Amino acid sequence: MRRGTRLHSLLGVLLLLALAYFNWLPAGRGPSGGGGGGFKLPVPWLQPRMSFAGRAGTHFIDAGTGAPLYVNGWNSYWLLSARSPALAAEMLRRGRRMGLTVCRTWAFSDGGPGALQISPGRFSEPVFQNWLRCLNLTNERPVAMQQKACRAMLDYVIYEARRNHIRLILCLVNNLDNFGGKAQYVQWAQAAGANVTNSADSFFSHPTIRGYYKEYVKVMLTRRNSYSGIKYCDEPAIFAWELMNEPRCVSNSSGPHIQAWIEEMAAYVKSLDTKHLVTVGIEGFYGPGRSERLGVNPGDWAASLCSDFIQNSAVKDIDFASVHAYPDSWLPKASMDEKVNYLSNWVDWHLNDSEHILRKPVLFSEVGYLQHPEVNSTVNGDTVLKLVYDKIYNSAKKLQAGGGALIWQLMVEGSQMYNDGFSMVARDRPSTYKLIKEQSCRLQRLYGKEDDPGLKCSLLP
């Protein structure tokens, strides 16, 4: 009897080891062989240990240890629409190798072929978790069909991010029409018979559309990941929820509606999820009521888009401010010196306002520059990136509000279809690759964090 008990115990241990092996097996080396870890193990306690990101005054913290947390990260908006899960997995692995800790990506695909949200409140479960379907089609169907089948693998991307110790900023809707955006919500309301104007600004003010958005948020935050068994609202691999990518309006009169929308939706997210940070997703422009700051904007046009950095970010349920920086496209005719001076002033004002007025961290969540500039473009990408990195580092040394910066955007080979002119494969640009790793290393060293062996910080100055 005792021998049988021991045998059962041994078999139990071997089974657990086998499960752990398949759970930790690097993507692309599993029994499915196609890349991306096809073996599902939806057991929460078997997932890699990870703490939530939090906030203490003007800086981020690791909620598990209370240690300051300053971010070096990147954007890959395309992870959920990658034509192969191996591409998303490889991007996350490369991010980790560069010491990057946060990735910002889209958590929406509204309407159209292969959409995540088919219509208000109707979702495609295969699109949430369709890695296996995607894998089966990868070598058998044309690229267009692969893209449709492999779209929006949200469960898998979150699962894979945690395996790579990457936290995600998940954006919930687009201001632009790409992947549906607010225009799709307006079309849905019109099709349902709601009295909605054709203006996309109706997204912020019409009660039917606000209800659609809330329903989407509720489904997302309460979803249980089919790969890990963890609800999104309980997942520490999510750094923050972003309400919208670059909210803007068409009419100046819509400014109060955007502000009211931010207040309502931030409070709604917090009512469902108290563990995660929330941000708006604004670009950082100052509104017409900030006469002393209008000169900080890249042009008069920026004050007419209905956003205001201070007012939007000051909302009680918004945990940190966001800023974008595109000197090359915002100031296309400026000289290199003019762009550098503008960017330096832009960053300084937002750091100062976040530290002394908002009393919240600020994340420069898109720092972008043209990778193939036209003849009249004079911006140097490394100069732009280094300027922002240096200011973030100096803020971090003082334990101040400069929470980090995310480069826009990184790709891997095979993802060129998502190239928007501001995209790069980092290792194809050695000087930029080195700059990114150096920033990761010095931020890690700043607060005594143990070096990631794969980053090899000791080999850098």
Image (cartoon, helix red, strand yellow):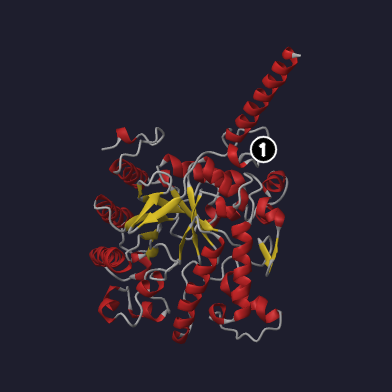
Q: Disc 1 on helix, strand or loop?
A: loop
Could you say which is closer to the camera, residue 420 or residue 366? 366
Spot occupied by residue 259 in the image (x, y as percentages of width and height): 45, 77
Q: Look at 31% across and 43% down and name the residue there.
A: 438
Visible in this render: residue 424?
no
Is 73 placed above or below 179 here?
above
Visible in this render: residue 138?
yes
Could you say which is closer to the camera, residue 386 or residue 425? 386
Task: Identify the residue at the far front of this view.
Answer: 1
Q: Look at 43% across and 79% down and name the residue there.
A: 306
Query: What amino acid is labelled 1 in the image?
Result: Phe
Spot occupied by residue 359 in the image (x, y as percentages of width and height): 32, 64
Tally the marks: 1
Q: Is residue 92 left or right of residue 56?
A: right
Q: Look at 62% across and 57% down and name the residue there.
A: 222
10 Å neighbourhood of mark 1: few (<14), some, or many (≥20)? some
Spot occupied by residue 215 in the image (x, y as percentages of width and height): 63, 68
What quarter of the picture does the N terminus occupy? top right
Q: Which residue is mark 1?
A: 39
Classify residue 22 by image quadrant: top right
Spot occupied by residue 68 in the image (x, y as percentages of width and height): 34, 48
Q: Look at 53% across and 38% down and name the residue there.
A: 48
Is 39 placed above or below 177 here?
above
What quarter of the picture does the C terminus occupy? top left
